[in-house]
């Protein structure tokens, strides 16, 4: 006999769609109504049989697995804690507490996606808004270096291009969509204007737009765009009612990085002299925005934080995971709710094999192959409730669709914190 659970939040990506209806039968998920293919894959691939901790490939009890974890962390001189982007905010608080207790380096997956965004916020600030405002008010949407029709599939229908809101009752007909990217994408095909720029020219194009918005003239093309294209975009930005620029890793992880983002932030802030204009980063993992929030509340910095000296130190390039692992500076690693072996550069991922690695995750992944200890904790939003931050930094509640039969990250981290030695 199946049962329906309504208003479930999908935590696969930063959209955090909270209108999903899940059909369950026993310990299986049969359907995830309204979820996009990415979200459906997460729900339908839920594996209720993945629940046995492993140490050196051998099945052990939870006490033994926690004890092995504590031994590794106690023996390490320079432990690294990495991940955080797919766990709950409650667990993220515990991770920071553990890092503080151990004198560890802590870094989230932000360091390989939107870290330049955090650096730009620190430099020039961010004129931003919620996705609710986008839905209700925005008549100009710019997608820069991102492809939401592939990465955030319901973004258009729930919040942006196609959504019908208070001042946009006709949805797509009430909005102009511009895509700026280095190549044609699926999102570009649906845009009113697609501006194909040369790779690595984002900073120059953004600076040129600032010049034009300030009323000065540019007679030549920049970054593969003609002066007419630049002037038209600047005019659209100045004359719309409410503009929003969304941007992705095509801006943050290309040459210029935080300078690109700071230039976009400055452009959007300056446009507020003429109308309302906001900027929103397209955050990937379901709670990567929460990782930035929690680390900032508790340490003052969004990621790449070392507690080795007994107080938090911020070190982009020094305490970022890729750099720490590539230089071989960590002698143990605790990975929470992420898969660095699948996503980090080869040199960094390879070094995880050399050191004792503990993996705390609700599913098997590529990092399971190198982990000495595997802790198969509950999946927030499926078999445990929790809190997650949407890409616009609005916290939402994740409902459990099954009773909790596995310990959560928060519970296991609390046990580890009690058992490890204070550094
Ligand atoms: S857009 Fe993102 S949050 Fe929404 S259903 Fe798809 S994967 Fe889940």
Image: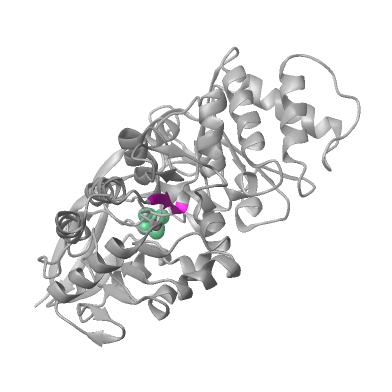
Q: In which quarter of the image is residue 268?
A: top right
Q: Where is residue 86 in the image (x, y as percent from the top left)?
A: 34, 57
Q: Which residue lies furthest to the bottom in this view?
A: 58
Q: Quarter of the image for the N terminus: give it.
A: bottom left
Q: In which quarter of the image is residue 403?
A: bottom left
Please, which colouring scheme is shown? one colour
Q: Which residue lies furthest to the right in this view?
A: 220
Magenta stretch: dominant secondary structure: strand
Q: Position of residue 410 (x, y in %)?
A: 19, 55
Q: Is residue 410 magenta?
A: no
Can residue 390 be seen here? The reply is no
> Measured along the vertical axis of the image, is residue 234 above or below residue 99?
above
Can residue 277 be seen here? The reply is yes
Q: In which quarter of the image is ligand 1?
A: bottom left
Residue at image coords 47%, 28%: 128
Describe residue 142's horizontal placement relative to residue 353 as left or right: right
Q: Is residue 108 magenta?
A: yes
> Measured along the vertical axis of the image, is residue 386 above or below residue 43?
above
Residue at image coords 47%, 41%: 160
The magenta-colored residue range is 105-109
> Measured along the vertical axis of the image, is residue 51 above or below residue 344?
below
Residue at image coords 40%, 49%: 288
Q: Position of residue 6 (x, y in %)?
A: 18, 56
Describe residue 26's horizontal placement relative to residue 132 as left or right: left
Numbered disc total: 0
Describe residue 79's horizontal placement relative to residue 263 as left or right: left
Front-lying residue, 133 or 254: 254
């Amino acid at each position: 006999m199946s049962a329906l659970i309504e208003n479930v939040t999908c935590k696969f990506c930063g959209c955090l769609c909270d209108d999903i209806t899940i059909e369950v039968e026993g310990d299986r998920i049969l359907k995830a109504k309204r979820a996009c293919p990415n979200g459906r894959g997460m729900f339908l691939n839920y594996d209720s049989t993945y629940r046995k901790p492993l140490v050196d490939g051998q099945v052990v009890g939870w006490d033994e697995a926690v004890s092995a974890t504590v031994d590794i962390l106690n023996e390490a001189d320079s432990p690294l804690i990495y991940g955080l982007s797919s766990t709950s905010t409650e667990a993220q608080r515990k991770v920071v507490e553990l890092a503080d207790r151990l004198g560890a380096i802590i870094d989230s997956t932000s360091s390989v996606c939107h870290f330049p965004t955090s650096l730009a916020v620190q430099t020039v600030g961010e004129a931003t808004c919620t996705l609710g405002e986008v839905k209700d008010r925005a008549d100009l949407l710019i997608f820069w270096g991102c492809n939401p029709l592939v990465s955030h599939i319901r973004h258009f229908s729930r919040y942006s291009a196609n959504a019908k809101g208070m001042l946009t009752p006709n949805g797509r007909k009430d909005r102009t969509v511009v895509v700026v990217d280095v190549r044609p994408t699926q999102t570009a095909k649906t845009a009113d204007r697609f501006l194909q720029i040369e790779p690595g020219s984002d900073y120059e194009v953004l600076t040129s737009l600032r010049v034009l918005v300030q009323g000065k003239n540019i007679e030549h093309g920049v970054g593969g765009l003609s002066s007419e294209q630049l002037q038209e975009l600047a005019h659209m930005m100045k004359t719309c009612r409410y503009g929003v620029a969304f941007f992705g890793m095509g801006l943050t992880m290309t040459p210029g990085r935080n300078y690109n983002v700071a230039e976009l932030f400055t452009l959007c802030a300056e446009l507020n002299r003429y109308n309302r204009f906001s900027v929103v980063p397209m955050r990937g993992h379901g709670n990567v925005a929460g990782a930035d929030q929690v680390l900032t509340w508790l340490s003052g910095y969004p990621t790449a934080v070392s507690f080795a000296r007994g107080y938090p130190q911020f070190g982009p390039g020094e305490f970022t995971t890729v750099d720490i692992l590539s230089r071989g500076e960590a002698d143990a690693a605790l990975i929470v709710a992420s898969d660095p072996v699948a996503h980090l550069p080869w040199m960094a991922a390879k070094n995880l094999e050399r050191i004792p690695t503990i993996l705390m995750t609700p599913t098997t992944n590529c990092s399971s192959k190198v982990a000495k200890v595997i802790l198969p904790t509950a999946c927030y939003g499926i078999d445990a409730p929790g809190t997650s931050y949407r890409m616009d930094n609005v916290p939402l509640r994740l409902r459990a669709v099954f009773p909790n039969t596995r310990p959560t990250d928060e519970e296991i981290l609390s046990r580890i914190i009690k058992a490890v030695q204070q550094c």
